[in-house]
Image (tube, rainbow, N blue to C red):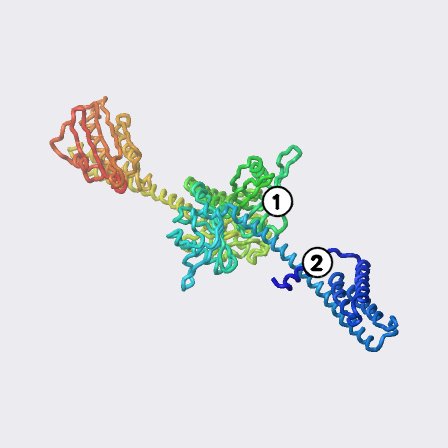
Amino acid sequence: MNVESRTAPLLSRFVVWSVSKRPRQTTRYIIASLIILFIAVFRYAAVTSLVPWMLFMPAVMLISLTFGPLVGVYATFLSGVLAAVSMAPGQTLASLTAEQWVGSGLFLIVTSGIAVTAGELRRALWNARRLADETERAKLALGKSEKRYRSLFENIDAGFCISEVKFDQDGRPVDHRVEEANPAFERHTGLADAVGRYASEVAPGIEQHWHDAYGTVARTGKAFRFEGEAKPLGRWYDAHLFPVPDGKVGMLIADTTKRREAEEALARSEEKWRSLFKTLREGFILGKVIRDADGRIVDWCYEEVNDAWYSLVGMASGAVVGKTIREVFPGIEDDWVMDFARVVDTGEPIRFTRQVGSLDRWYEGVAQPSGHDRFTVIFVEVTDRIQRERRQAALVDLNDRLADEVTVSGIALSAGEILGRALGVELAGYGDVDPDAGTVTVDRDWTTGGARPVGGTFNFRDFGSHVDDLKRGETVVVRDCRTDDRTRRHAAALEAAGARAFVNVPIFERGTVAALLYVCTSVPRGWSGEDLRFIHDVAHRLRLAVGRRRAEQQQHILNEELSHRLKNTLSVVQAIAMQTLGRSEDRTAVLEFESRLSALSKAHDLLLRQNWSAADLHDVAASVLGSFGSDRFHLSGPQSPAGPRATLSLSLLLHELATNAVKYGALSVPEGSVDLNWSIRGDGENRLLHMAWTERGGPAAVEPTRKGFGSRLIRMGLIGAGGVELHYRREGLAVEMTAPLHQLQQA
C-alpha cells in the first residue's frame, strides 16, 4: 500500500468526522481565525520574511476541508491581511510597495482557489463516503432480502425449478435441463440429482407434452398451467410454468396423484394448487368471519379477492374488498355464510356446488380454514354444466313421460312442462298448424307464474310477420317483441299473451309445416345457443312421440278394420266349407275343420291386439285352451314373446293336443288335467325354449296306428320345424317340444 492509498481513507474519514460534528457557523469562523492568527505568530517568530505566505496555504486548505469553502475564503483574506501587514515597512497596509500589493493580490487569488478547491474536495469526499455508506446499506438490505427469498424458496411446499429448454433445428422443443431446484422439488419428484441434467436423463421416457409446455412458455413468454402425468415417475402433477429472465422457464409443481386417485370425478373441474395469485383463472377469496356478541358467526367479509373473482361474478374490479357478503349480495342464501362458518369452527375443508340466486349463476369450489377466523375459497363457475346436466335430466324425464302418455294432448302438455321448467319460462306448448289458413290450434299448454293459458285457434298474422320464417322452416327467435322488426307493431298482443320474448320451432311433415313448439317469457331474454339446442332437441323428441302416437292410433284403426275383415273372410270360408261338406257322412272331419279354423281365428285376434308383432306364450296358450275349460289346465312359464308365424303354429299345435286329450286322453274323464310348462335354457344365441305337455289322471296313452293330419301337425313342433318328442305313458300322453328362442321370437 502506498502513501496515497493510506492518505485517501484518512482524509475521507477526517472530512466525514468534521461534517458529522457540524459546529455552529460562528464557532467555525472563530476556530478559523485562531488558526490563522497562530500561523501568523508562528511565522513572525520562527520563519524569516522570505516566505511570508507559504504557511498560510496549508492552513487555508485545512480550514476549507474542515469547515467548507466560505470559511476557507474568509481565512484566505484574513491570512492575506496579516501577511501583508507583517511585510509592510511601517507595519501598515498603506506602507506596502506596488510589488507587495501585486504579491498580496496573487496570494489572495491563489489561496482563494485553494479554498474553493478544498471545499469542493470536501464535498466530493463527503458524497463519496455517503455513497459508499448507502451502497453498503443497500448490499446489506439486498443480502437480507436474498436470504429471505432464498429461505422462502427453500421452504415452500410446492416443488420449484428453473429450466433451460432445448430446441431441435426445426425449433421444436425436445428436452429441458433443470438448472435450479428447491428441496420440495425432490420430494415431489423423487429425483435427487436432477439439477444440471436433462429431463430425458433423469426420467427416461418422459412425455413430450412436458417439453411442449416448456417450449410454449419459452417462445410466447406467457404463463401456462396444466395437470399432466409423468409416467416415468408414476405421478400426476398440477404444474404452473412461467417465463423467467434469460429465456428460461420456471415451474411450480404440486403432486396431485393421491387427489386424482381419491377424487377422479372432480379432478377436471378443480386445481387445488395455485402458486401465483394474479395468474389464477379460478376465483380466489380470503375471507374473515364476523361474530356477534355471543361469538356466533353471522356474516363474513372479503379481505382479498383476485381478478378472476370479478370476472366470475360480473362485478367491477375493486368493488368488494372490505365489504361483507350480505352487503355485496343482498338476500344471499344463508348457506353461503353458514357453510364457511363451519369451515372456520371445525377446521375442516368443504367442497361445494351452489347457486347465487341473485346472479343466477352456479359455482363449484373448495373452502379451507386459514386460521385466526379466516378462510380461503378457490372456485369456478359451473352454470353451463349445471344447466346441461339439468337439461339432460329433463330429457330423460321427457322420454319417460312421453312413453307413458297415451294422447297427443298429454304428450304436448308433458313436453311443455318439462321444457318450461328447464328453461325457467312462464309459458310453453304445442299447436297444430294449418299452413294454408295461416293458423295454429292449441289444445292445452303449460303455464306458471301467473301466465295466462293459451287455447284455441289463432291467426299468425295477428302477432307479426314471422309466420313467413316458419313456413321456410326457420326457427323464430325473438329476444324482445318491442324491438324485433317482425313483431314490433304487434307487441301489445304478444305481451298480452305473455310473449315479450319467445322461440317458435316449426315441425314439418311431408315437407310442410304441420305443428309448432313455442316457448315464451314475459320479460326480454337473450336466448343462448344452449337454450336453442335444448328447445330443438325437445321439438325433435316431441315430433317423434306425436308421430308415433298418431301412427299407433291409425294402426289401431287399421287393425280393427283388418280384424273385422279377417273374421268376415274366415266366416265366409267356414260357410263355404259347411255348405260343401254339409252332406258328408264324416261329421268328425267337418267338426275338426271347424275347430281348427276357430283356433286359427283366435290366434289372429291375439296378434292383431299386438299390432301383428308378437304375442306372449301365456296369452297364446290361455286363448287357445280356454275353450276346453281353463280349470283343466295348469300353465306355468316365464314371459316370452312369440312371433306371428310361431303364434299361429303354436295355436294349431295346442288346439290339436287339447282335441286329442278330449277324445282319448286326460280330458276324456272328469278327474283328468293337463300341465303345460315352458322354460328357457342355455345362454346367448344358443338359448332354447323348452315346452312340456303332460296329461294326468286319464287313461293310458296309446300310440295311434294311423298318422293323420293332426299327428303331422303336432310333430311339426313350435315353429313348424320339428323338435318334438312324444311319450305314450301309462299316466297319459307327454309331449316335449324345443325350438331356438330367437327363431321362435322372429318367426
The residue at the point 81 percent across, 73 percent down is 104
- Tell me the residue at 62%/34% (across/down): 296
User: Badge 1: few (under 14), some or many (20 or more) residues near its Cα, within 10 Å?
Assistant: some
Left or right: residue 133 compared with residue 79: left
> Foreground residue, 49 or 403?
49
Whether residue 477 is situated above or below residue 582 in the rendered picture: below
Q: Label 2's element?
A: helix
Disc 1 secondary structure class: strand
In the image, residue 623 sits, relative to residue 60, either above or below, namely above
Q: The N terminus is located in which quarter?
A: bottom right
Count of marks, rendered view: 2
Q: Would you name the residue on which mark 2 appears?
A: 16
Quarter of the picture containing the C terminus is top left
Q: Is residue 430 visible?
A: no
Q: Is residue 468 left or right of residue 44?
A: left
Residue 151 position, x and y percent, is 54, 48
Amino acid type indicated by mark 2: Val
Residue situated furthest top in the rendering? 671
Residue 602 x %, y %: 28, 36
Q: Residues within 10 Å of mark 2 (few under 14, many from 20)?
A: many
| Residue in the picture at 45% in, 58% down | 165
Disc 1 designates what residue? 302
